[in-house]
Image (cartoon, rainbow, N blue to C red):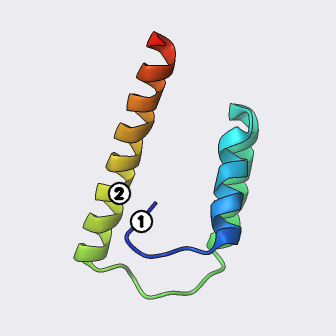
Amino acid sequence: MSTTSISTTVEELLKSFDLLPEVEKHRVAAEILRRSLALTSAPLTDDELALNAEQVFLDLDRRESQDGQSQSG
């Protein structure tokens, strides 16, 4: 995931999310975003934004690689 550690509970939640049908993923994501609006936190620094963006791209590359392997094998 990211360079910071996350709990086992969060890992399991994310694994469960990945198993959902696309329609349900969109519903869950929308609900999480809606609930997140209520959270108060300091804005991310440029470095934090860059690290998060890098991790997203690395995750996407990994998924694309896995998808390519599963389709060719």
Sequence order check, earlier mark of 2 and 1: 1
The residues tagged by marks 2 and 1 sit, at their Cα atoms, a distance apart of 6 Å
Query: Which sits in the foreground, 45 or 52?
Result: 52
Residue 68 percent coordinates (x, y):
42, 21
Identified by mark 1, the residue type is Ser
Q: Which mark is residue 2?
A: 1
Identified by mark 2, the residue type is Gln
Q: Which quarter of the picture shows residue 72?
A: top left
Task: Identify residue for label 2.
Answer: 55
Q: Which mark is residue 49?
A: none
Residue at (45, 30) in percent of width and height: 66
Residue at (24, 74) in percent of width and height: 46
Q: On the rendered structure, is 17 left or right of 4?
A: right
- The secondary structure type at the circle numbered 2 is helix
Question: As displayed, is residue 14 above or below residue 26?
Answer: below
Q: Which quarter of the picture shows residue 37?
A: bottom right
Asked whether the beta carbons under mark 2 and mark 1 sit within 8 Å of each other, the answer is: yes
- The secondary structure type at the circle numbered 1 is loop
Question: As displayed, is residue 25 above or below residue 11?
Answer: above
Residue 35 percent coordinates (x, y):
70, 70
How many numbered dots are placed on residues in this image? Answer: 2
